[in-house]
Amino acid sequence: QVHVVESGGGLVQPGGSLRLSCAASGSIFSIIVMGWYRQAPGKQRELVATITSGGSTTYANSMKGRFTISRDNSKNTVLLQMNSLRPEDTAVYYCNAIGRTTTPLNFNSWGQGTQVTVFS
Protein backbone atom coordinates (compact mmCIF):
# COMPACT_ATOMS: atom_id res chain seq x y z
CA GLN A 1 0.00 0.00 0.00
CA VAL A 2 1.21 3.48 -0.85
CA HIS A 3 0.40 6.54 1.23
CA VAL A 4 0.58 10.11 0.03
CA VAL A 5 0.69 13.05 2.43
CA GLU A 6 0.57 16.74 1.56
CA SER A 7 1.67 19.73 3.62
CA GLY A 8 2.22 23.43 3.21
CA GLY A 9 -1.20 24.89 2.58
CA GLY A 10 -2.46 28.00 4.30
CA LEU A 11 -3.68 31.56 3.97
CA VAL A 12 -1.98 34.09 1.72
CA GLN A 13 -2.79 37.45 0.21
CA PRO A 14 -3.07 37.97 -3.55
CA GLY A 15 0.35 38.16 -5.12
CA GLY A 16 1.86 36.06 -2.38
CA SER A 17 3.58 32.69 -2.51
CA LEU A 18 3.17 29.26 -0.97
CA ARG A 19 5.07 26.03 -1.34
CA LEU A 20 3.30 22.70 -1.10
CA SER A 21 5.10 19.47 -0.31
CA CYS A 22 4.06 15.89 -0.88
CA ALA A 23 5.66 12.66 0.20
CA ALA A 24 4.80 9.15 -0.91
CA SER A 25 5.66 6.18 1.27
CA GLY A 26 5.07 2.46 1.46
CA SER A 27 6.00 -0.49 -0.71
CA ILE A 28 7.14 1.64 -3.61
CA PHE A 29 9.21 0.17 -6.40
CA SER A 30 8.93 3.13 -8.73
CA ILE A 31 6.80 6.23 -9.20
CA ILE A 32 6.13 7.02 -12.82
CA VAL A 33 4.43 10.35 -12.33
CA MET A 34 3.58 12.63 -9.43
CA GLY A 35 1.24 15.54 -9.68
CA TRP A 36 -0.90 18.17 -8.09
CA TYR A 37 -4.61 18.68 -8.65
CA ARG A 38 -7.03 21.06 -7.03
CA GLN A 39 -10.71 21.32 -6.32
CA ALA A 40 -12.51 24.55 -5.56
CA PRO A 41 -15.93 24.60 -3.87
CA GLY A 42 -18.63 23.60 -6.32
CA LYS A 43 -16.15 22.69 -9.04
CA GLN A 44 -14.59 19.52 -10.35
CA ARG A 45 -11.06 18.49 -9.52
CA GLU A 46 -8.64 19.86 -12.08
CA LEU A 47 -5.03 19.37 -13.06
CA VAL A 48 -2.46 21.79 -11.69
CA ALA A 49 0.84 20.18 -12.74
CA THR A 50 2.52 16.81 -13.14
CA ILE A 51 6.10 15.63 -13.33
CA THR A 52 7.47 12.30 -14.53
CA SER A 53 10.40 10.37 -13.08
CA GLY A 54 12.45 11.74 -15.96
CA GLY A 55 11.58 15.32 -15.12
CA SER A 56 9.06 16.07 -17.86
CA THR A 57 6.44 18.52 -16.64
CA THR A 58 2.90 19.45 -17.59
CA TYR A 59 1.04 22.52 -16.36
CA ALA A 60 -2.50 23.75 -16.67
CA ASN A 61 -2.53 26.91 -18.77
CA SER A 62 -3.58 29.20 -15.94
CA MET A 63 -0.61 28.03 -13.81
CA LYS A 64 2.11 28.38 -16.40
CA GLY A 65 4.69 30.94 -15.37
CA ARG A 66 3.35 31.15 -11.82
CA PHE A 67 3.66 27.60 -10.49
CA THR A 68 6.70 25.34 -10.57
CA ILE A 69 6.65 21.62 -9.88
CA SER A 70 9.78 19.75 -8.88
CA ARG A 71 10.58 16.28 -7.65
CA ASP A 72 13.14 14.32 -5.65
CA ASN A 73 13.02 10.76 -6.94
CA SER A 74 15.30 9.47 -4.18
CA LYS A 75 12.86 10.68 -1.52
CA ASN A 76 9.60 10.12 -3.41
CA THR A 77 8.66 13.74 -2.85
CA VAL A 78 7.21 16.44 -5.04
CA LEU A 79 7.04 20.19 -4.44
CA LEU A 80 4.76 22.82 -5.88
CA GLN A 81 6.05 26.39 -5.68
CA MET A 82 3.14 28.76 -6.18
CA ASN A 83 3.86 32.43 -6.89
CA SER A 84 1.65 35.37 -7.82
CA LEU A 85 -1.32 33.70 -6.20
CA ARG A 86 -4.82 34.87 -7.09
CA PRO A 87 -8.13 34.51 -5.27
CA GLU A 88 -9.21 32.02 -7.94
CA ASP A 89 -6.36 29.75 -6.84
CA THR A 90 -8.27 29.09 -3.63
CA ALA A 91 -8.94 25.36 -3.46
CA VAL A 92 -8.03 22.11 -1.80
CA TYR A 93 -4.82 20.88 -3.41
CA TYR A 94 -4.33 17.16 -3.78
CA CYS A 95 -1.15 15.22 -4.46
CA ASN A 96 -1.23 12.15 -6.70
CA ALA A 97 1.33 9.42 -7.29
CA ILE A 98 1.18 6.70 -9.95
CA GLY A 99 3.64 3.83 -10.12
CA ARG A 100 4.39 0.27 -9.16
CA THR A 101 4.80 -1.39 -5.78
CA THR A 102 7.41 -3.96 -4.88
CA THR A 103 4.81 -6.75 -5.18
CA PRO A 104 4.58 -5.70 -8.06
CA LEU A 105 1.21 -4.04 -8.50
CA ASN A 106 0.24 -0.77 -10.07
CA PHE A 107 -0.88 2.01 -7.75
CA ASN A 108 -2.65 5.32 -8.15
CA SER A 109 -2.68 7.03 -4.76
CA TRP A 110 -4.12 10.32 -3.56
CA GLY A 111 -3.42 12.39 -0.51
CA GLN A 112 -6.07 13.87 1.77
CA GLY A 113 -5.56 17.37 0.41
CA THR A 114 -4.32 20.66 1.80
CA GLN A 115 -6.30 23.90 1.79
CA VAL A 116 -4.93 26.96 0.03
CA THR A 117 -6.85 30.18 0.57
CA VAL A 118 -5.95 33.41 -1.22
CA PHE A 119 -7.76 36.40 0.25
CA SER A 120 -7.47 40.15 0.32
Image: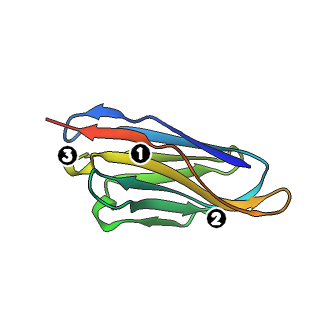
Secondary element under disc 1, as helix, strand or loop, is: strand
Query: Which-is-in-front pick, marks 3 and 1?
Result: 3
Distance in Å between CA atoms under marks 1 and 2: 19 Å
- Quote the CA–CA distance across marks 2 and 3: 33 Å
**Residue type, label 1:** Gln
- Disc 3, disc 1: CB below 8 Å? no
> According to the image, label 2 marks what residue?
54
Q: Which residue is mark 3?
A: 87
Q: Residue at x 27, y 38 (%)?
A: 117
Q: Position of residue 83 (x, y in %)?
A: 31, 45
Left or right of residue 55: residue 14: left
| Coloring applied to the structure | rainbow
76 on left or right of 79: right
User: Mark 3 is on which residue type?
Assistant: Pro
Q: Residues within 10 Å of mark 2 (few under 14, many from 20)?
A: few
Q: Position of residue 3 (x, y in %)?
A: 66, 45
Q: Is residue 58 above or below residue 117?
A: below
- In this view, the residue farthest toward the left is 120
